[in-house]
Amino acid sequence: MSIKKGFKLWRQAKKIIPGGSQLLSKRVEMFLPEQWPAFFKKAKGVEVWDLDGNKYLDVNASIGACILGYADPEVNRAVKKAIDDGSNSTLNCPEEVKLAELLCKLHPWAKMVRYARGGGEAMAVAVRIARAYSGKSQVAFCGYHGWSDWYLAANIVNDKSLDGHLLSGLEPRGVPRELKGTAIPFRYNKIAELKKIVSKNKNIGVIVMEPLRHEEPKDNFLKQVRKIADKIGAVLVFDEVTIGWRLNVGGAHLKYGVNPDIAVFAKGLSNGFPMAAIIGKKEIMQAAQTTFISSSSWTERIGPTAALATINKMIDKKVPEHLNRIGRLVVKGLKQAAKNNQLKVTVAGPPPLIHFSFDYGADSQAIRTLFTQEMLKKKILASGGVYVTYSLKKKQAKRYLRAVEETFRLLRKAIDNNQVHSLLNGPIAHSGFKRLV
C-alpha cells in the first residue's frame, strides 16, 4: 500500500502550518507517526480515499463531527441549494430563525439561541454570556471545553514551573497570567470537589461541565450540581459539543431530566459543516446584549441549513436509536476480543461514543500505536475509540470487529514475546493531552 503523496504533503504542511493541522486530534503524530495517510481526497459514508487512491473504513467520523456519515446526500443537497441561492448577504438568512425555533422546540426550557461556527468558540460565547449575567468571574468546570483563555487559565498556577499540571498536555502559554484562579476544575461524579470549590471561592458565577462523557452520572450527580448552581446563583452550562444528538435527538441532559441554564452544541449538529449553537433561558441569554459578541462568519447560510437538514434526518430516521444499537454491538465485540486474547483493555463511554485503552503502564501507548499500525494494514483507520455514525451499518461494524480480533491476537503475541517496540515501523504516537474526568 503506497501512501507517498500523503507523506510528502504532510511534510510540506508542517513547514507552513504550525503543527501541520488546525486540529490537534488530526495530526499524524497522534495516530501513527511517519505512516498515517494524513490527507483525504474523497469521503463518503464511512469510507475515505487518500491521495494515493487507497480506500479505508473510517470509524473516527472526523473526530465525531459527521454523525450521519461523510457527504450525507440529504444534507449535501440542502447545502448545495443554499450555495446556489447565495450563502451570505447584507440581509439575514431565515434559516437562523427556523433553526432557533427547532432547537427551542426540542429543548422546551430554552427560549433563546445564539450561533457560532465551532465548539471552542461557542463555549467561549457561553461563558461570556454566563459571566455577564452572573456578574462573577470565576468558573468551576469539569471535562474538556476547548482552547480558549477562560479554560486554559486553569493551568496557570503560582509557580511557573508547575504550569500545565491540571490539564496534562495543554500548555497555558499565551494565556494572561492575570487570569490565575479564574478557572477551577473538579472531576465528574465527585460532587464533594465542587462543594469544596464553592465553599472556598465566593466569586463562582459559572459552572461548566459535560453532562456525560465516558461514565454515567452516579448518586444524582447532575441534580446535585444543578442544586449547587441554584444555591450560589451560578449559571450552569452544559457542554453538549461531543455527546449531543448521540443518545437522543437533542441534548443528552434531556435523558437525565436535568436542565442547564445554557447548553452548547456543535460537531454532530450539522454533520461536518461548521456550525455551533448556544441555547439558553431567556433572561440569561439576554445578557449577551450587555456585552459584545459578534461575527460576520456567524451569519452565513450554510451552517444553519446543514443543521436543519441534519436534525430533521435524525428525527426522521431515528438516528440515535441506530447509533446506540450499533454502538452496543461494537462495545460487546471489543470486550469479547479482549477477553478472547486475554488483553487488559478498558472499554468506556456510552455506545455511540466508545473509548478504549490498553492497560499496560508505560507500554500502553506503544501497544495502542501498534494496534493502529496493524489496523491500517487492513485498510481501517482506527485508534483508541469509535464514533458511531448512521452510515456505520452492521456489516461494516462486523468488518471492524473481525480486524480487531485479528489485531488483538497479534498484540497478545507481541506482548508475550516482548516484541511490541520491535514490531513498530515508526515512532510511538503522541499521547496529546489527558482529559480531566
Image (cartoon, grey):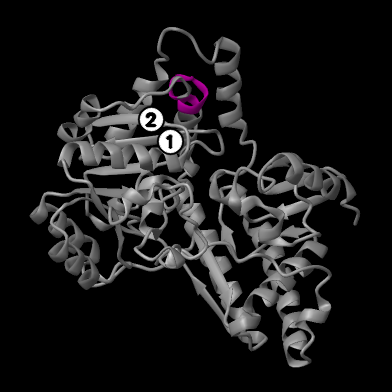
Q: Is residue 430 left or right of residue 425?
A: left
Position of residue 184 measured from the top left corner of the image (x, y, whole percent): 29, 60
Q: Magenta span: helix, strand or loop, mainly? A: helix
Q: Secondary structure at mark 2?
A: strand
Position of residue 158 measured from the top left corner of the image (x, y, whole percent): 34, 63
Q: Is residue 63 left or right of residue 120?
A: right
- Identify the residue shown where x is 28% and y is 57%: 181
Where is residue 271, by image quadrant?
A: top right
- Identify the residue shown where x is 38% and y is 22%: 96
Residue 136 showing in the rendered view: yes
Q: Earlier in the sequence, mark 1 or mark 2?
A: 2
Where is residue 107, by image quadrant?
A: top left
Q: Nearer the viewer, residue 187 or 40?
A: 187
Position of residue 155 measured from the top left corner of the image (x, y, whole percent): 40, 59
Residue 106 showing in the rendered view: no
- Mark 1 surroundings within 10 Å by alpha-carbon count, few (fewer than 14), some (14 through 19), many (20 or more): many
Q: Secondary structure at mark 1?
A: strand
Please say if 56 is above or below 336. Answer: above
Q: Nearer the viewer, residue 42 or 148?
A: 148
Q: CA distance from mark 1 to mark 2?
A: 6 Å
* Mark 1, residue position: 276
Residue 115 is labelled as 2
Confirm whether the magenta stretch covers residue 301: yes
Q: Residues at badges 1 and 2 in contact (C-beta under 8 Å)?
A: yes
Position of residue 129 measured from the top left corner of the image (x, y, whole percent): 26, 36
Q: Nearer the viewer, residue 208 or 314?
A: 208
Q: Nearer the viewer, residue 70 or 36?
A: 36
Q: Is residue 410 left or right of residue 75?
A: right
- Mark 2 surroundings within 10 Å by alpha-carbon count, few (fewer than 14), some (14 through 19), many (20 or more): many
Find the magenta span and give its range: 298-305
